[in-house]
Image (spheres, grey):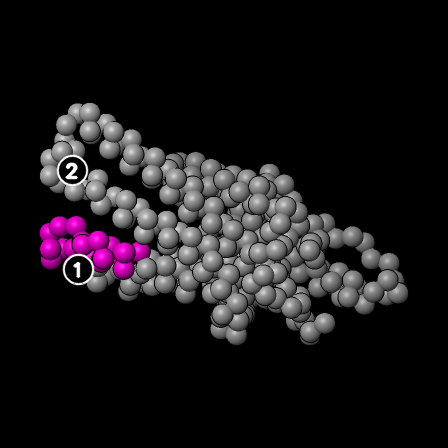
């Protein structure tokens, strides 16, 4: 087993190790997140091609008839719902696979793209359940004047790592995340803020040329440029997408070390049965 550095970390150390892992394992994390994002890219390109006749119909006036308006509106609504569900599903799959890869690297085990996705076997429904529950809770919090939503997002931000690594139920993962992040919501917020800034900067860098072109033309971009715009959404997702997941995965282990002496528990397990009795840790990560 590779040397494992399990110790309490400050927020700065969590972020430093995040970027260290990201830089040293870039192709691993890029490969993991690129697979689900590629599905979104292909779907997005398909929608652009499919939407072209609809857009032309509206611009020519054929879509302004009442019957056509209802029909086209229904098609657009269905497409939007399918796109949202597909996007959230594949993004969560990418995040979950990244969590398993970070866990392997953090605990000194071999990590690979194939192994990361293989660990999701039998956990997909639980993953979607906890993702939906998190989205619902945070959404209700944002409806209640935004601030409660931010606080809830910080407190339940470890629900997905907990659900995946500890095989917790969605409700159990939410409850345990609230317990682990107690007293550390501020650090969780700063991680979320940093990830949002990085995502915004990367997205703006790749999307600004298309926004400028559309503004200058005062019209919709040609089909070829719309397809390139979809690619411009894909690239920053691959580049920045893993960073937040790595940081939250490390924060999960950091809080377990701080609050549950996970470093000692892991050491005793690594030494084997002859090292003496050790109490089973609550929510010990699965080694699947």
Q: Residues within 10 Å of mark 2 (few under 14, many from 20)?
A: some
Give the image quarter of residue 66. top left
Residue at x-position 16% and y-position 33%: 63
Residue at x-position 11% and y-position 35%: 61
Give the number of the disc on residue 58. Answer: 2
Location of the C terminus by quadrant is bottom right
Location of the N terminus by quadrant is bottom right
Which element is circle 1 on?
Answer: helix
Please say whether residue 33 is one of the residues in the magenta stretch: no
194 vs 3: above or below: above
Residue 260: horizontal and vertical position, in percent? 70, 56
User: Front-most of 227 and 22?
Assistant: 227
Viewer-nearest of discs 2 and 1: 2
Magenta segment, which residues?
A: 211-230
Q: On the picture, is 73 further left or further right than 155?
A: left
Give the image quarter of residue 227. bottom left
Residue 50: horizontal and vertical position, in percent? 28, 44
Q: Which comes before the other along the chain, label 2 or label 1?
A: 2
Residue furthest toward the top?
Answer: 67
Q: Which residue is mark 1?
A: 212
Q: Residues within 10 Å of mark 1 (few under 14, many from 20)?
A: few
């Amino acid at each position: 087993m590779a040397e494992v550095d399990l110790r309490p970390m400050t927020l700065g150390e969590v972020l430093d190790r995040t970027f260290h892992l990201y830089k040293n394992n870039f192709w691993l994390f890029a490969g993991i997140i690129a697979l689900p994002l590629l599905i979104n890219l292909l779907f997005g390109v398909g929608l652009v091609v499919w939407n072209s006749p609809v857009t032309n119909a509206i611009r020519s006036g054929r879509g302004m008839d009442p019957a056509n308006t209802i029909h086209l509106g229904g098609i657009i609504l269905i497409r939007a719902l399918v796109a949202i569900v597909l996007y959230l599903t594949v993004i969560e799959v990418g995040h979950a696979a990244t969590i398993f890869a970070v866990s392997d690297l953090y605990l000194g085990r071999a990590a690979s793209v194939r192994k990361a996705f293989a660990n999701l076997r039998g956990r997909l429904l639980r993953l979607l359940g906890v993702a939906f529950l998190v989205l619902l809770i945070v959404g209700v919090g944002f409806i209640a004047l935004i601030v409660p939503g931010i606080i809830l997002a910080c407190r339940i931000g470890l629900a997905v790592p907990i659900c995946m690594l500890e095989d917790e139920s969605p409700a159990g993962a939410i409850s345990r995340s609230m317990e682990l992040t107690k007293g550390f919501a501020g650090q969780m917020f700063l991680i979320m803020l940093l990830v949002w800034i990085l995502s915004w900067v990367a997205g703006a860098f790749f999307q600004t040329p298309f926004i400028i072109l559309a503004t200058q033309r005062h019209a919709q971009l040609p089909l070829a440029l719309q397809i390139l715009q979809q690619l411009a959404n894909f690239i920053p997702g691959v580049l920045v997408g893993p960073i937040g997941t790595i940081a939250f995965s490390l924060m999960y282990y950091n809080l377990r070390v701080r609050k549950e002496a996970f470093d000692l528990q892991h050491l005793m397990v690594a030494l084997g049965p002859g090292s003496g009795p050790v109490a089973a840790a609550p929510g010990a990560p699965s080694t699947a």
